[in-house]
Amino acid sequence: MVEIEGKTALITGGSKGIGFGIAEIMLKHGMNVAITSRSQQAANEAAETLKNTGKGEILAIEADVRNAGSQQEAVGKVLKKWGKLDVVVANAGLGHFGSIEELTPEQWQETIDTNLTGVFNTIKAAIAPLKDSKGYIITISSLAGTNFFAGGSAYNASKFGLTGFTQAVMLDLRKYGIRVSTIMPGSVSTNFNNHEPGDQDAWKIQIEDIGEMVVDMLRLNPRTLPSKIEVRPATPPGS
């Protein structure tokens, strides 16, 4: 297995949800982790919670994935602190749901700008240091990137696009020794779409489960690449 202690990761949208869960598990394995949020306060609060999780160091960064310059600055801060970048997890995302008759142009644009263009901005900013480290890019797509549903036109479009984008980027960058994968979760116990997690979500994938999956991918021999992973609850209600 590849040794990951001491490696450095940047996680967008890492102050809560799946990004927070990935950061927590990485820190437990001795990685140094930078988490971003559009709110410096949210990033700071998450970093304070995570700071004693393991041997790794935590860095809180205010950054908006919709802004290419903001992503370049975030990568620069990681390089300034640790001198390298080994892993990028493009996790930041949001969802607006409703019939196409109700969906506003502003909701459409925010969804595409965050979930799809935001990943483009993140990866573009990180390519050069990842070439140096022969690093790893992981995007967090969704089963909504392969399964469409009513009321999901904006979200489906962003995640279908993200899944295809990631697979093409994988082919573009593998010649540099950069591995690229996408994870497509089903129901995860998070605050996504203003949900408040509780005991009723015990059947769902937990954020630490995604974190463990990411660490397993990083530790895999570089000759092998799980390029697209679908993951879902093993026993959903009514099954």
Image: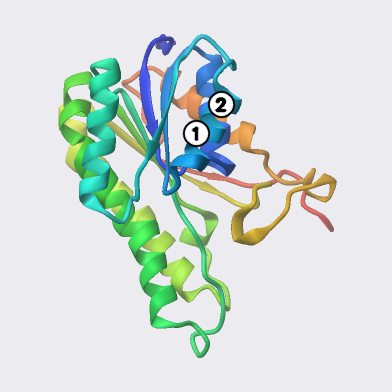
Residue 179 occupies which quadrant of the picture?
top left
Please report the residue visible at 57 percent of the width from the left and 42 percent of the height from the top. Answer: 16
Numbered label tally: 2
Q: Secondary structure at mark 2?
A: helix
The C terminus sits in image quarter: bottom right
Q: As rendered, which of 114 and 62 lies closer to the eye?
A: 62
Q: Position of residue 15 (x, y in %)?
A: 52, 39
Which residue, given by chain and number where applicable, does mark 1 sit on? 44
Q: Are marks 2 and 1 in contact (CB under 8 Å)?
A: yes
Q: How is the image coloured?
A: rainbow
Q: Amino acid at mark 2?
A: Glu
Please report the residue visible at 38 percent of the width from the left and 58 percent of the height from the top. Answer: 114
Q: CA distance from mark 2 to mark 1?
A: 6 Å
Please report the residue visible at 38 percent of the width from the left and 54 percent of the height from the top. Answer: 163
Q: As rendered, which of 15 and 151 lies closer to the eye?
A: 15
* Mark number, residue 48: 2
